[in-house]
Amino acid sequence: MAGIPDTYAYFNGEWKPRSQCKIDLLDRGFYVGDAVFDIARTFNGKSFKMKEHVERLYRSLKHVRIDPGLSLQEMIDLSEESVSRNEKFRPEVGDWHVWQAVTRGTGGWRAPVSPPTVIIQCVPVPFRAYSKLYKTGGHLVVTKTRSYNADQLDPKVKHYSRLNFNLADLEAQDVDPEGWPVMLDSKGNLTEGTGYNVFIVTNGVIRTAGDSSLLQGVSRGAVFEVAEQLGIPVAQEELQPYDLYTADEAFIANTPTCILPMTKADNRAVGDGKPGPIVQQILAAWSERVGLDIVDQAVRFGGK
């Protein structure tokens, strides 16, 4: 990828430049999406909630019945080693996504499967994709493309079978070129976006969907922690598009952005159409927690 340093990656027991890591065309992760992954991030080169991310990875692995051949602690240690091995590259990019991925291995369709493919890599946090939105807010679009039903593929598994996410992104951009999709479940309730959890604020209460139809985001959990610290009530409940349209504030939470205000939904202003006070309070508290100004860093590196 142009402009990204050739960082060192862990690939099936070896450390090598990322450009030298090659996936077999019959690897089931590529061939049929038979893979799970997770992504942590760093702040000033120090990992944030690495244990929680790797624990979620291992829940996904257990659910899909892949043995990575590494203990949970070994995966944590290798992930931290990835950060330290790539520290020399960090000043030019700001901070890292620490990306673990495990496929079932090479085997093709119904063929015997080789040992799993295990990858740990550092890639730059994509500040450019969202840095300007802390000031203006992003735009949400409720899509017709739905979340997976838990009877088909449990959304709590962080997997690579994400064509619905890709289609939702395309659909949102058809409605609003700056649109960030929000998907519904089979009953028409709001679930999640394509790699982020969605929150609204109504009368001072943070409201978000329960976890039956969405990924249990590590950043989602961090929102709960910060809200408790600030004394802001949180409710997990069924929400419909109506609740989003009539909310006082809206925001998303994920690993790169931490939280990001959303000021439009389906081309309607949310609240007064500006990032609201609850978002600002959480961002300030989160910045204090990680020891850097989240917005300032995103703006500095997003402009490069």
Image (cartoon, rainbow, N blue to C red):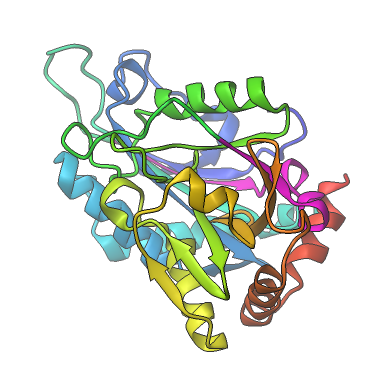
Q: In which quarter of the image is the N terminus?
A: top right
Left or right relative to 187: residue 10: right
Does the magenta portion include 242? no
Nearest the eye: 237 or 177: 237
Left or right relative to 65: residue 283: right
Q: Quadrant of the C terminus?
A: top right
Q: Which residue is drawn at 40% across and 46% down?
A: 191
Q: Position of residue 205 (x, y in %)?
A: 51, 73
Nearest the eye: 125 or 22: 125
Q: In this view, does 86 lie above or below 267?
A: below
Q: Give the range drawn in magenta.
A: 117-141
- Asked whether the viewer can see residue 86, the reply is no
Q: Residue at x 37, y 13 (%)?
A: 25
Q: Position of residue 90 (x, y in %)?
A: 72, 56
Q: Where is residue 138 in the image (x, y as percent from the top left)?
A: 71, 46
Q: Where is residue 43 in the image (x, y as percent from the top left)?
A: 65, 67
Q: Which residue is drawn at 25% across and 35% down?
A: 149
- Asked whether the viewer can see residue 20, the reply is yes
Q: Residue at x 66, y 49 (%)?
A: 125
Q: Is residue 302 above or below residue 174?
A: below
Left or right relative to 263: residue 296: right
Q: Please state the total of marks drawn on the protein image.
A: 0
